[in-house]
Amino acid sequence: MALKKKRPQKSLAAGRPPILQRQPKSITRKSTKALINKHHLLEKRKKQALAKGDDAAVVTIDAEMQALGGLEAYQKASLQGQREDRGGDSSRVLMDWLQPCLTAHKESSGRMLKMLEVGALSTQNACSQSSHFDITRIDLNSQGEGILQQDFMERPLPKDDTERFDIISLSLVLNFVPDPKGRGEMLKRTREFLRAAGKYLETPSLTTNFPSLFLVLPAPCVTNSRYLDEEKLGAIMESLGYTKVASKTTQRLVYYLWKMDGKGIPRHFRKEEIRSGSTRNNFAIAL
């Protein structure tokens, strides 16, 4: 009997492979969480060292991060949340919320809506496959086609409305900004990239949901933080001109769709304790 030739295994691209591509067996959820938390802590320590001008500490921290596998290891750990056995693609929730209005819009107009996906993991998620969106995908360490390597905080501001978007996706991105002020600045900056609400007056099918921000966070960031809860998050977003359209909370994640209605009323939000307890986490947003 002739021996079957072994087919060469297809290597996955470095970084974040597509969701629908078959993945190797994942590391445990506990290990994934530990790696992500350690990376987050080191990022915070590095920022503090840079602010103090402590070059020696920066070198030491960089070495620690590389020992963990660097940014690529962190991205692979983040990708575990996209696997079917870890809850799947978060954009499915967004599509469930938007499908009725998107269908009505497509029938009446046919114009694809523009989406900016920050921290994109894949070109094959539910939004990408829906045919409703013209998507610009960016990521800090992209090594895949269709995803631009770019820091959202350094992305050039739009010159005019042709460079703005109907919706921005921040799915599991804000929680990896290392400090509360930086998270507030990121949320504030999203407004610069969205089209004005008045642009949708002639398209009734879109006025309820657009322009908008899709925000996904680990549930404990809101449900178990010393410094942030649902009420405070709502107040922060309202001060930025956002109104909550939809939300969903699961054991692992919280999902929000925020519509930008206007400029908001500027307010200051500091890192102040609103819930005590030794089991609380320190996630916070400051403006």
Image (spheres, helix red, strand yellow):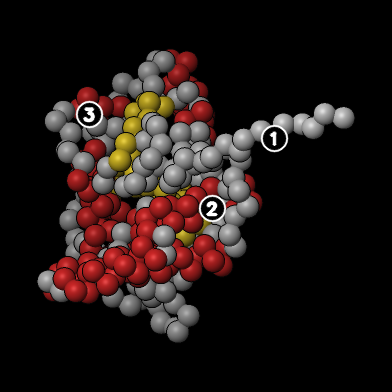
The answer to whether residue 32 shows anywhere in this view is yes
Label 3 secondary element? helix
Mark 3 Cα within 10 Å, few/some/many (few <14, many 20+)? few
Residue 157 drawn above or below residue 202: below
Q: Which residue is mark 1?
A: 6
Q: Residues within 10 Å of mark 1 (few under 14, many from 20)?
A: few
Q: Which mark is residue 163?
A: 3
Task: Compute the Cα span from label 1 to label 2.
Answer: 29 Å
Label 2 belongs to which residue?
80
Residue 194 spot, x, y in % from top left: 26, 36
Kind of residue sitting beneath label 3: Glu
In-image side of 268 versus 24 (left or right): left
Disc on the earlier residue, 3 or 1:
1
Q: Position of residue 202 (x, y in %)?
A: 31, 21
Q: Please identify, in this view, whether the residue under mark 2 or under mark 3 is nearer the observer.
A: 2
Q: In this rendered view, identify the residue nearer to me: 191 or 141.
A: 141
Which residue: 17% across, 56% down?
266
> Looking at the picture, which amino acid does disc 2 mark?
Gln
Alpha carbon distance from label 2 to label 3: 32 Å
Residue 103 numbered mark, or none: none
Residue drawn at (49%, 50%) of the image:
79
